[in-house]
Amino acid sequence: MRRLPVIAGALALLLSACAHKADSSRPSTTLGMTLGAKIHVATTISTLNSFVQGVGGEYVSVKNIVPIGASPETFAPAPQDVATVADADVLVENGAGLETWLDRLLRDAGRPNLRVVVCAQGLPVKNLNPHLWMDPVFAKQYVAKIRDALIAADPAHSDAYRRNAASYDRRLDDLIAHIRQQIATVPPSHRYMIVFHNAWQYYNDRFGITTLGFVERNPGQEPNPQQIAQLIDLAKQHHVHGVFSEPEYSPKILYAIAQGAGIAVVEDLYDDSVGTDPRVRNYIEMLTYDTNVIVHALK
Ligand SMILES: [Zn+2]
């Protein structure tokens, strides 16, 4: 059963190669795009990039705006980002307040009518927290929205987009089952986390981990001594095993909390951005890796 999509994919590739030859004599479609040319998709963050690659496959060329390892919350666009947006057929953003810099970028690029996919639209946002993609059940909705936008932008390849999206959706189902099974190996009394920034709310809510506290309340804002003392108290009360952070943030303050509570610092979680480490280059690898790190730290 597993081999079937691969064969279908190879067939589609062959057929499309033929179609491209036939189409090269046609100047353009009604969309103003040369048939056979890839559509240009811009994504705001690298995790969304994974979904577009999965759904678009060989028919899209994807450019990402916030560099890998940078924080989308404190990002400032550069001239090359204006060029990326100016050149895009579709732009994929998270929404829910994450990309505060995007409206200006769209204006600067002179693309008021650009087709924009707002992935988090319609999903249940909690506490103004935009990190909905960290719940792979919500990621399925992201994939569906991206599929629909690619079909609208490039109807000639609708079948491929539908097939790729269905295949990615199955991979997300496998991922969800894997995470559930991994978290089940952690005793319930250990399922507590203190995190650097609140990227883990939706993942934790989905998989039954309590987010006891987070260090950074607003982007770039360090906690005051009273808040640090509160986090140390919480960590002690609940016998929290570690404080968690990402490689892109400075963990200095985390060491103060960890030392105060006598617990470990885990500073290699990926959430806002995938990584360059071969284990975390795309969304599915990233959540598989993170889950492994969390489960080991909490046990
Ligand atoms: Zn974030």
Image (cartoon, rainbow, N blue to C red):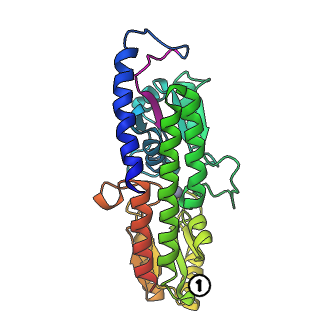
Viewer-side residue, 259 vs 263: 263
With respect to residue 161, does 106 lie above or below? above
Residue interval drawn in magenta: 32-42
Viewer-side residue, 199 vs 248: 199
Report the residue at 52% width, 89% height from top. 187
With respect to residue 140, does 262 lie above or below? below
With respect to residue 111, does 45 lie above or below? below
Report the residue at 44% width, 18% height from top. 35
Q: Where is the N terminus found, in terms of image quarters? A: bottom left
Query: Residue 220: horizontal and vertical position, in percent?
Result: 51, 57
Magenta: main secondary structure equals loop
| Residue 101 shows up from this direction | no
Three-letter code, disc 1: Leu
Report the residue at 52% width, 27% height from top. 154
Report the residue at 55% width, 66% height from top. 200
Query: Residue 61: horizontal and vertical position, in percent?
Result: 40, 33
| Residue 102 shows up from this direction | yes
Query: Residue 13: horizontal and vertical position, in percent?
Result: 36, 34
Q: Is residue 87 magenta?
A: no
Which residue, given by chain and number where applicable, does mark 1 sit on? 234
